[in-house]
Amino acid sequence: MTAQQHPGIAELIRLRQDETGWSLNAIATATGGRVSRQTMSNLAAGRATEWPKSTDTVTGLATALGVREETIVLAYATTIGIPISKTPSLLAAQLPANTDLLTPAERNHILGLIRALTDGRTPDQGDGDG
């Protein structure tokens, strides 16, 4: 993903697999039956060519991928070629849907950690394994 592009559905699926070790079948199951295994396979391969036919698809993907529904909508837009002018960082796109449940103090601690980890870095230094 470039700095100007929101992650697509395939990238969100790959990130969830990297995070959890889940197979595509497990992710499809985690949608609660809202997304078939075949559809999940197509999405993971970057073969989405149109908007989902049902809002249940968006809700199921958000649940399974642990992100907000609007992240799924923006990822679909990117995947089918609709340019997104203002995009969140990859980290922002990966935040779980229940992030809003954090207290202000917890959010401040997380922001402090991120600031400490990134202080003094330049954009070309942000993609390491460290």
Image (spheres, grey):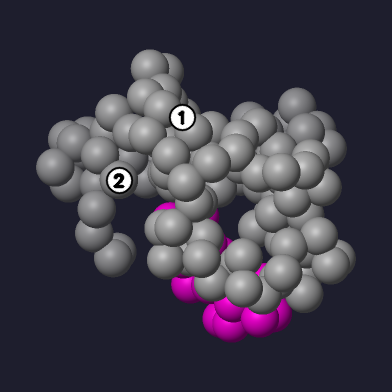
Disc 2 element: loop
Q: Which residue is denoted by mark 2 in the rendering?
A: 1
Q: What stretch is highlighted in magenta?
A: 11-27
Q: Residue 88 carries which label?
A: 1
Between marks 1 and 2, how big is the CA–CA gap? 11 Å
Magenta stretch: residue 51 in it?
Answer: no
Residue 39 versus residue 93: which sits nearer the camera? 39
Which amino acid is tagged 1? Pro
The residue shown at (41%, 58%) is 46
Lower position in the chain sequence, tag 1 or tag 2: 2
The quarter in which the C terminus is drawn is bottom left
Within-10-Å neighbours for mark 1: few <14, some 14–19, many 20+: some
Give the percent coordinates (x, y) of residue 107: 67, 33
The residue shown at (48%, 72%) is 18
55 relative to 35, above or below: above
7 relative to 89, above or below: below
Magenta stretch: residue 12 in it?
Answer: yes
Residue 64 occupies quadrant: bottom right
Q: In this view, does 64 lie to the left or right of 117?
A: right
Give the percent coordinates (x, y) of residue 34: 81, 60
Question: Visible in this render: residue 113?
Answer: no
Which amino acid is tagged 2? Met
Give the percent coordinates (x, y) of residue 89: 42, 35
- How many badges with numbers are in the image? 2
Question: Visible in this render: residue 95?
Answer: yes
Q: Do callouts 1 and 2 mark residues in contact (Cβ within 8 Å)?
A: no
